[in-house]
Amino acid sequence: MRFSTNEAAFEASKQVLVGGVNSPVRSFRSVGGTPYVVDRGEGPYIFDIEGTRYIDYVQSYGPAILGHAHPTVVAAITHAAQRGTSYGAPTIGELELAELVAERIPGLEMLRMTSSGTEAAMSAIRLARGATGRSKIVKFDGCYHGHVDALLAAAGSGVQNQGLSGSAGVPDSVVADTMVLPYNQVPRLDDDVAVVAVEPIAANMGLVPPVPGFLQGLRDECDRVGAMLLFDEVITGFRLGYGGAVEWSGVTPDVWAFGKVIGGGLPVGAYGGTRQVMAHVAPLGPVYQGGTLSGNPLAIAAGLATLELLDHDAYLQLTTTAERLADGIRAAFDSSPISVQVPQVGPLLGFFFADQPVVDNDGATASASTGHFAPLFHGLLERGIALAPGPYEVLFPSLAHGDSEIEQTISAFAEAVATL
């Protein structure tokens, strides 16, 4: 191999990649130290170029829900690649994936594929504005909807991990029509609001579930003023459950954005709605959106292979794994003077350094400001457990995480917590 240590590879990367990385959170800026450089992944594990094995709870931030390099997904990608990697023309695969997504999500009838979750959210916002003829957007503090200029205000996740509240290069005029409000509080809307964008379960300021009545309150308020409700399910879509946030909450939005899991680990996104809503999108309507690589056959093949394995039993297993892990993390703090909250919703879980449940970004920020996350992160890393390198992220157990991996993780938490 060209490099024998993570440090050497990262130093070389810094000469040609901005900050040595292709996404800021990978730089370890919020936790300090040198990032591990991945050589390969296998099931619940990743291996760095030094040969160190980690039990991985990043899982590419969610899409490796079956585990890394799942043989069925690899076979599907290989077969697709042998037939061609991109055509710029329709394929049967994209039809089949759209049908599969639509049949699982109550109320969703029609989709448009994109190449990323950011593209999906951006396009869904454009669609809502075009369909309503309005310009104002409502989003919630700490919710992340990709690096779209108009949605980067108070965006949580990787933005906050860099110590930022927004981004330079975004003119005031671009966010003039973006209103940022506290999560878990139903706002009073004006009739010039085009869309309310929300993570139905916030997963970019840690894991913050909606309080009872929040999502239904948004639905009712949007109906009152004629605004659209957008569920950003880039994380929750097919990670939360078989039918996504609609099945879980009983609340149906007007527009959805998807990503991550529907590509099985390859770059993909999609946005959708009813036939009536999607009729506004070109070539049927005046809202333009396109992409040469949208519906890429490799990503479509990986997504189909992944979703076909995610039946109800799979989600039961994922939830059981998450419950065991959440209980173990709570137990690791039992003898510690540090208070912890471990929210868990289905297969999603996170933790906060707090003595009360966290319901918004203020609580998440207070948890991050304790300074406990960085030493805990490195303590776990030293014990072979890889979390996302930032206090605003969640844990993503996969179907490949078995009893042995969960037991090792709980033991590592107990040891690392004892050193805080």
Image: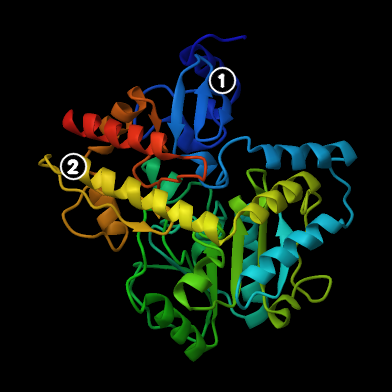
Task: Name the foreground residue: 76 vs 59.
Answer: 76
- Front residue of 210 and 169: 210
Q: Which label sits in the foreground, 1 or 2?
A: 2
Q: Which mark is residue 82?
A: none
Image quadrant where one finds the N terminus: top right
Q: Secondary structure at mark 1?
A: helix
Q: How many marks?
A: 2
Residue 115 visible, this orientation: no
Q: Amino acid at mark 2?
A: Phe
Q: Please determine whether, in this image, residue 121 is positioned above or below residue 55.
A: below
Label 2 SS = loop
Q: Residue at x 33, y 22 (%)?
A: 382
Instruction: Give the camera-side residue of 64 and 360.
Output: 64
User: In x, y percent, where is residue 4?
Assistant: 53, 9
Disc number placed over residue 13 in the picture, else none: 1
What amino acid does circle 1 point to? Ser
What residue is drawn where x is 52% and y is 40%? 400
Contact check, label 1 and label 2, Cβ < 8 Å:
no
- Using a 10 Å C-alpha cutoff, classify the residue at mark 1 as few (fewer than 14 neighbours), some (14 to 19) or many (20 or more): some
- The residue wearing badge 2 is 333
